[in-house]
Image: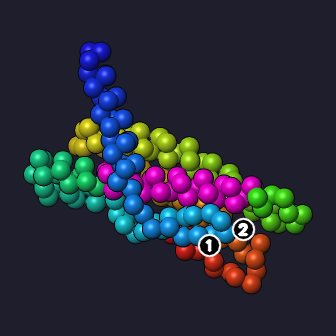
Amino acid sequence: MTLVIVLIIAAVLGLVVLVGVTVGARRKSVGSYQLELIDLDAFRNLVDPSETAYLRHRLPVSQFRRVQRARLRAMALYVHAADRNASALMRIGQSALAGKDTQTSQAAHELIDNAALLRRNATFALFRIYVALLWPTAGLAADPILHDYERLNGSAMLLGRLRNPASPGHTSTVS
């Protein structure tokens, strides 16, 4: 039993390293911060339970496992990118707290709160994804990360508009 647990932990750590090495995403500069562009439509497709159910019913079990593992690896890359973007946006929100405008300060607090929530949920989602890589036929729910990221994107756009009204859509390219 202990050997099985050690092997599972080693496999999960190996996957973490593998995903970390293979990440090669495009980046968008916002101020001095680098944000990765995330294709929300592709991410939405990956986390859609109806897409998974469709593939499960249409493909033979062995082929479904192979396809689902590829989808899970892609999903992990999106979650990692969303986590890194949340970290950068959290720093942007913290720098905006110094302003005297109450509306900007409230928007900065909202951005920081949304970023912290996304980062916490990303950790749990990655754990579920890595477990699902071991058992790809098990169900997985990573769609909360997508919703958290969309909310974070909205908070970032609001803060960007408040800090620089002359450029209303400059942070909307995060998605």
Does the magenta segment cover residue 84? yes
Residue ranking furthest to the bottom? 166
Q: Main secondary structure of the magenta part?
A: helix
Relative placement, left or right, of 48 versus 158 is left
- Identify the residue position indicated by label 1 in the image: 171
| Mark drawn on residue 159 | 2
Residue contact between numbered discs 1 and 2, judged by CB atoms under 8 Å: yes
* Coordinates of residue 114 in the picture (x, y in percent): 64, 54
The picture quadrant where one finds residue 52 is bottom left
Q: Which residues are magenta?
A: 72-94
**In this rendering, is residue 40 above or below 98?**
below
Element carrying mark 1 = loop
Relative placement, left or right, of 49 versus 157 is left
What residue lies at 69% left-to-right and 60% top-to-bottom?
92
**In this rendering, is residue 64 above or below 6?**
below
Of 152 and 48, nearer the camera is 152
First-in-chain label (1 vs 2): 2
**Type of amino acid under label 2:** Leu
What residue lies at 45% left-to-right and 53% top-to-bottom?
79
**In this rendering, is residue 135 above or below 29?**
above
